[in-house]
Image (cartoon, rainbow, N blue to C red):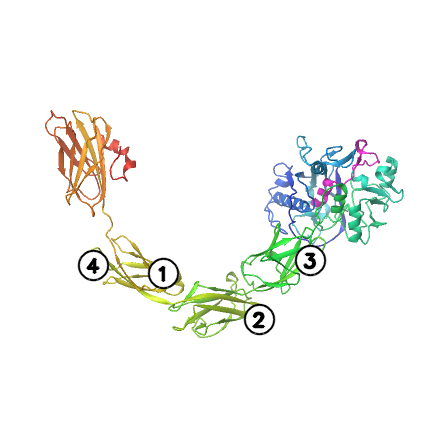
Amino acid sequence: MTVNLFIKSGLAALATLAPALVCATQITILNGDGNGEGFNDPTPVAAVGGNNATTLGAQRLAVFERAAGILESYIDSDIEIVVKAQFNGAEDENLFCSPNAATLGSAGASTIQRNFPGAPLRDTWYPIALANDLANTDLNANSEKNYEISATFNGDIDNNDNCLRGNNWYYGFDDPNGPDNSLLSVVIHELLHGLGFTSAVNANGTLAGGYMDVFSRNLFDQTQNKSWDQMTSAERLSSSTNDGNLVWNGAQANQAANALPLSNGLNAGKIQMYAPSSYEGGSSVSHFSTAASPNELMEPSYTEFLTSPGLAAPLLADLGWTVITATELQLSYNNQPLSSGQTLAIPTEDTSFPLSGGKPPLSATLSVNGTSQDSLVELQTNSLTIKMPTSGAFAGRYELQVTDADNNSITLYLDRPLRINTNVSALLDQAIGQQVWIEGAAAGTSITLTSDSPQITTTDGSGQATEQFVASNDGGNFNRAVANLKLATTNLPTQTTLTASATNLPQGNQTLDVLTGKTATITVTDTANQPVTGARIEADDQRLTGWGLNSSETTGSNGQASLILARQTTIVTVSASGYGSKNVTLAQEQTSASVQLQEPALAFSLNGNINASGFSFDEAPTATLTFADGQSENLTTLVLTGSFATFRWEGDLNQQTPIRITVDHPQARSAISRDISALGNTTQTITVELSALENNGGTLDLGGSGGGGSPFSLLFLLGIVEFLRRKAFTV
């Protein structure tokens, strides 16, 4: 059944803001719109009321998902509830829009079911979502309508002077505070219809398909003293316009209404239903009476911004839904529960509080000295976070109030202190400049900075001793006030605590280590023990710059340079042009070290090509390399074809100097040995041709890296580039 919601004038305002607490229930929004319309409308929009989506369609979808999340926290079901939703305009005969009235939206169950497994009442219609829950299975999973609720909303309302006199949908999650209509309130209202808050009885009083539905079984007429399942069709028709006397007969909703209590809208302790003397299709019977006070979300007209189902929640319980009962609202911190009115200190960073209980949706307000700071509050599934501002003042006493849908609340007072930062993580007695930054006060605030050690004093930018500083007007740096620290040369403590205080602001404290310094001298020589001039020594300690000290120095003609360092273990890197660099670790008390630098490696590669003339390489030829120190090395040769083989050697000419290469093979007339001491210091290629025993002699072609040798050498060398990093080829 489709239920329409109509608008009336006289909008009121009631602020509510919160994401609902999430349970196992899942309500999924299925986008039923086409390209460029409804949920897919690409029109750019600005963020509004906590809805940060950037297109009109995305904002609409965000509101639907918010509404689904709120209802998820009220009903407990293991079966997914799918809502097929769309926005239509004047082309939809069920929607209309005029300057004075409009159909905002309509929704209902996609199907109704009876006599399913687990049905509490025989021969009774149930909305499919409730039937699924009671049967604990998806009864329409294989049907064409594989969704439980169908919802259509009026897209002509936006920016249309001919519709509601230009009043638009409001897509924020908070109170519109104006003439626009909260889409969030309307969506929750319509989804409640889809969950079962609607009668399936026809307008003439006859039963749908000849059977009573579960909602209508709970309707009662005080005049006739009968429930609707006891009446004839004519009696039901009469009852549907019996204003003030058609009431709800379910025990749980009536109990809640009397406990609230409703100041109006009750008849003999029972909730009055909407039954005007002139029947209104889509509104009569399936809503609470407009006489209800305070206003209820399930009245037939939009009255004010409401996001709590109100009495609709216990009414759903009367139908058979398992409705979640709220527990006491509770915040905790550091694993300790907090009491309303409690004051506690929070750090100068985002601070989270585990949150439980309360009837959703929850709202939260935050203020400092009466100024709203609500933008710093973030309500999450089971927690609340007080965020740090990104600029300006932040120190002060914050008043936090969290309220649930039943107006139960908890109030906390949160002290966020001034923040003390330094340009270094520790203090050093030999430092030239050490700064302290005091952040978080309003611009112009007078701040006092003190140390618990008389050996550590504060000065201003000119070096004058003072403990008084003024917050700057520099919002990007949190109105930072800058102080300088001066340390005595003797009797320093190992730690000091700095305290920043100002009138009516929580004081800030920072404890810093105090380090003693040392002068470390590094002597740099080469492998001949000669001083290396111009070598760079650099300490791996980023704090040195903050202390106003050099992190690197250059050696003089004596090969020495000195650095002022903290008396801690420090790694120093020594480097010089023409030498390889070296790291040296200075122990905590070590004040000197000697470092010997080596000339860099002189890399050399020898590539050899061996050609067989008049015979084939049935086995690999041999290649022996002789060095200047008399040692030799047998190289591995690689046979690539029957008449062609190669070898390769790589080395450091500073370590080994090759002077001769000798190549031989059992079928060769003789070995070929050639002097290679005159080769350059880069990659060189030689080509050797071995002749068969019956031939005379052999030839040795010697060339540079770019030429010489067999015309095949380049071709085959290209195929073995992958071996260039190895000392010799291996087969």
- Residue lying furthest left in this view? 696
Helix, strand or loop under label 3: strand
Q: Is residue 132 magenta?
A: no
Q: Amino acid at mark 3?
A: Ser
Q: Is residue 199 magenta?
A: yes
Helix, strand or loop under label 1: loop
Q: Which residue is mark 3?
A: 409
Q: Which residue is mark 4?
A: 530
Q: Quadrant of the C terminus?
A: top left
Q: Earlier in the sequence, mark 3 or mark 2?
A: 3
Q: Amino acid at mark 4?
A: Gln
For image coordinates 18% across by 43% down, the residue present is 680
Q: Which residues are magenta?
A: 186-213
Q: Which residue is mark 2?
A: 503
Question: In this orientation, does residue 293 appear?
Answer: no
- Where in the figure is residue 462, as x and y percent of width and height? 43, 72
- Where in the figure is residue 650, as x and y percent of width and height? 23, 41
Residue contact between numbered discs 3 and 4, judged by CB atoms under 8 Å: no
For image coordinates 62% across by 41% down, the residue present is 41
Q: What is the C-alpha distance between the residues marked 3 and 2?
A: 30 Å
Q: Nearer the viewer, residue 158 or 379?
A: 379
